[in-house]
Image (tube, rainbow, N blue to C red):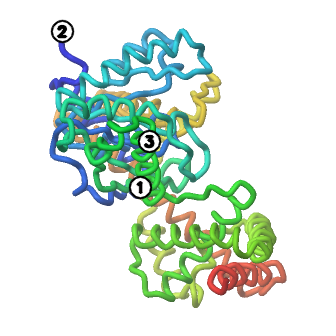
Amino acid sequence: MAKLYEYNRIYGIVKRFVIFTFRQYYGEFVINGKENIPAGGPVIYTSNHTNALMDPLAIMSVVPPRTPVVYLARSDYFHNRWIRKLMLYFKILPAFRIREGIGNVDKNYEVFNRCLEVLLHNKPVGIMPEGSQGFTKQIRQLVKGTFRIAFAAQQTYGLQPGVKIVPIGIDLEDFEKFGKRIIINIGEPIEVADFMPDYQKNPAIGLNRLREKLRQDLIDLTLHIPSQRYYDTIETAAEVANESISRLFNVLNDTISRFKVKQKIASHLLDLENRRPDVVMQLEKTCNDYRRQLLKLHLPNWVFDQPNGISRLKMSGLVVALMITFPVFFPGLLVNMMPFFGPDLLIKLFKLHLPGGLSSLRFGLGILIFPLAYFIQAWLIYKKFELSIWQFLILLPLQFILGKFAFRWYQYFQRVGMMLRFKHLQRRSSEGFNQTVELHNEICRLVMSA
């Protein structure tokens, strides 16, 4: 019988398909630090955990294609017998929590030993060290299980380099929506051997030092906003002031550079929360007013980031481009209506629920609905118009290509609509619009002057 950590051809084919579709789920897929992925050996991949099954897939997407990763996931995903078999096939083991009863927690010893077996065969394990899923952008305290496994596996190597922990920060533009941005930030591997002298003297001290090191690395790789009172304020201010500060310091206009600016703004505001609470209180009121105004105007923040507004020439060019490409958009929409809207329809119809995992449900259903819909539609067209088998085979990927184009077209259509609305309100110079501009500028001023 094949071992859990062994690679097989069918698993490899399925993995490639899943990762390909996972990448398509996001409008912008950014990987930073891929050079930090170890070439081999016992590796524990760890990341922040905000999005159910999408976080393990993010890890899977950055490891070498022929490297199977054995994951730990919350045990309630395994209650259904068929889902349990599917999860085990995809090399996912259940992790039990205290709230599920002491008897169930004892089962973790078996899972612990299986993880050790994987690592001692120089294969990687994937663990979410926060222990449960969070719903905000912050790194919570890490549970001990990850580090117990790491030190147990490192015993084989003693003080020599062996087990490595790779921190991975995942930043999602939106926790639920399709077509948004994902950033996968890969940090430098942590050598568990560096913490073995402390662990041998006092296991608790060694474990806690390794835990703090990993937590700090994850904080450095993510947008970390641990404030309870001012979370929304800091998140809003970091988004609003990003463009102005980036222009001021001539920051490169790329996703990673702008993300780092946002991290620095958030860190600065967290420091201000302690040093200058009066400034943060004023910022809170301004951000609250700004968000309310955006809702009233039905405008997103990004349209206010243009320093000189949007040129008429650029606007005209975008409108003409949309009109010219509409004949491609429309058939793309028609052949993709079932896969585009099918997942949400099934979720509502059958009242499907996965805690914090709406995007995971959409992705899981989509990975079945998209190929099935494409095959059925291509088959019907093939039969109706008596096409050749080659035309049938061309139709299958053509539907996917048209679907991607249709979705991008719709995104640009929405952006152009927002820009036109912005221009209209700007020309009218209404009180609400002018107030929103002033609030936007006030947020930037407060962030930069404090």
Q: Nearer the viewer, mark 2 or mark 3?
A: 3
Q: Position of residue 384 (x, y in %)?
A: 33, 30
Quarter of the image where one finds residue 286:
bottom right
Which residue is denoted by mark 3 in the rendering? 205
From the viewer's perspective, is 435 left or right of 352?
A: right
The kind of residue tagged 2 is Met
Dot placed on the residue nearer the N-terminal end, 2 or 3:
2
Please report the residue visible at 42 percent of the width from the left and 46 percent of the height from the top.
25
Please report the residue visible at 35 percent of the width from the left and 32 percent of the height from the top.
371
The kind of residue tagged 3 is Ile
Query: Is residue 64 placed above or below 243 in the rendered structure?
Result: above
* Rendered image: mark on residue 1: 2
Tally the numbered discs.
3
Please report the residue visible at 67 percent of the width from the left and 73 percent of the height from the top.
272
From the viewer's perspective, is 42 left or right of 112?
A: left
The answer to whether residue 268 shows anywhere in this view is: yes
The kind of residue tagged 1 is Asp
* Rendered image: mark on residue 217: 1
Instruction: Indicate the secondary structure of the residue bearing disc 2.
Output: loop
Q: Nearer the viewer, residue 73 or 375?
A: 73
Please report the residue visible at 35 percent of the width from the left and 38 percent of the height from the top.
201
Instruction: Indicate the secondary structure of the residue bearing disc 3.
Output: helix
Quarter of the image where one finds residue 217:
bottom left
Quadrant for the N terminus, please. Answer: top left
Q: Position of residue 196 (x, y in %)?
A: 30, 41
